[in-house]
Image (cartoon, rainbow, N blue to C red):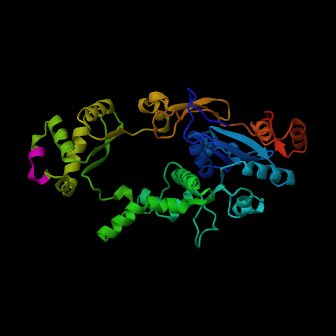
Amino acid sequence: MSSTETGGAPLPLDGVRVVEFCQTIMGPSCGMVLADLGADVIKVEPAPGGDKTRKLHGFAAGFFASFNRNKRSVALDLKSPEGKELAHKLIQSADVVTENYAPGTMEKLGVGYDDMAKLNSGLIYCSMKGFLSGPYENRLALDEVVQFMAGLAYMTGPPGRPLRAGASIIDILGGTYGALGIMAALRDRDRTGKGQFVKSALFESTALLMMQHMAGEAVTGTEVPPMPIRWGAWAIYEVFDTSDGDQVFIGLTSDNHWRRFCEHFGRQDLLDDPKLKSNEDRVKAREWLKPIVHEIFGQHTKAELLEICERIEVPFAPVAQTKDLFDDPQLNANGRMLETRMPNGKMTKLPRLPVEIGDHDLGLRLQPPEIGENTREILVELGLDDAAIGDLEAKGIVVSEPPAAE
């Protein structure tokens, strides 16, 4: 399946076929990155129920719609000989396989790397797990588990109250590193003609995020405290209350920021104070300086403060909630929000990949698929005729139409 953007230009990964055996976030986010970049990503779902992520509620209700756009769905019973044979045919036609099931699952299903590499010597096979090779490699893990295990939860919450981040950042990061490894392996294959095994992991992805704190502890020789009580590198870098009961984050991180702040608010006394000449001086004076700055900012409404900060060119941000993002002017500029279909049929706007690559339109080509929405067309591509497909459907080995609504 060719993936072209508006105007017919091929996308960067046009011609690359990915067979995805993934669920939840880590694996599907990897596939989303590849699909948005133009790969033909075929999502293999278990027949008859499909990806269990489709049925999640609460915090997880948006998982499937978020990470499965621009993909095709085929539903197979991999535990049947016929379903396994179809999976092998798919993998023989593929450039890439991705999977994020528990360790050993793909091998039990007969679609592990060692066997599939014998079928397809050019295959790039990416496993996304809790841990890379080593003493923990067979442990199960989740995004939240590794945030605690690698210290990120400790750094996020106040002392004694470790707290996971407010989004599935490790799943998404691990999936993105999986996509990066896949693209490097494809480039390798251009030179060697050979495929290889690629692995990304949650724990090591979290450790990479902690690298700045590890280095900081090594440099200072002191234990790095959690972020809510950190001794920051800048004097003014925090949330300020506004006169209308809202909040704005403001950072005065350079001498120019400090000068423009003092000049705008008529505080020449602060600008001339020798105890506040440099950022380092202001950090030392933070205890008595911060109340002064809080009082100045607190005399203004949120709207006034946002306008002032933009005008005097200092870093600032409204303290936004999820609902504020749908109509954010920056996110909506140049068509960067994609009208995406939710499981209940409702349409909503979701962000594109956060990159710009030349003139490429990394937009929405396919809505998140229904269970087995593309089974029939994919089996036809593999050489099966209508009679063979009908027989597989009758036996429940494949699902080729969305199930009737209950």
Picture quadrant where residue 243 is located: top left
Classified by dominant secondary structure, the portion drawn in magenta counts as helix
Any part of residue 157 in sight: no
Residue 399, visible in the rendered structure: yes
Picture coordinates of residue 254 (x, y %)?
22, 47
Q: Position of residue 336 (x, y in %)?
A: 49, 32
Vertical position of residue 146 compared to residue 70: above or below: below
Tell me where residue 210 appears, x and y as whole percent.
43, 61
Residue occupying the point 63% across, 37% down: 70
For residue 282, above or below residue 16: below
Q: Residue at x 22, y 54 (%)?
A: 286
- Where is 115 relative to 248, above or below? below
Most foreground residue, 292 or 256: 256
Of the 4 image quadrants, the one containing the N terminus is top right
Q: What residue span does the magenta drawing correspond to?
A: 270-275
In the rendered view, does 105 fall on the left or right side of 190? Answer: right
Q: In the figure, residue 49 lies in which quadrant? A: top right
Vertical placement of residue 110 versus 376, above or below? below
Residue 370, located in which quarter of the rendered image?
top right
Q: Is residue 139 magenta?
A: no
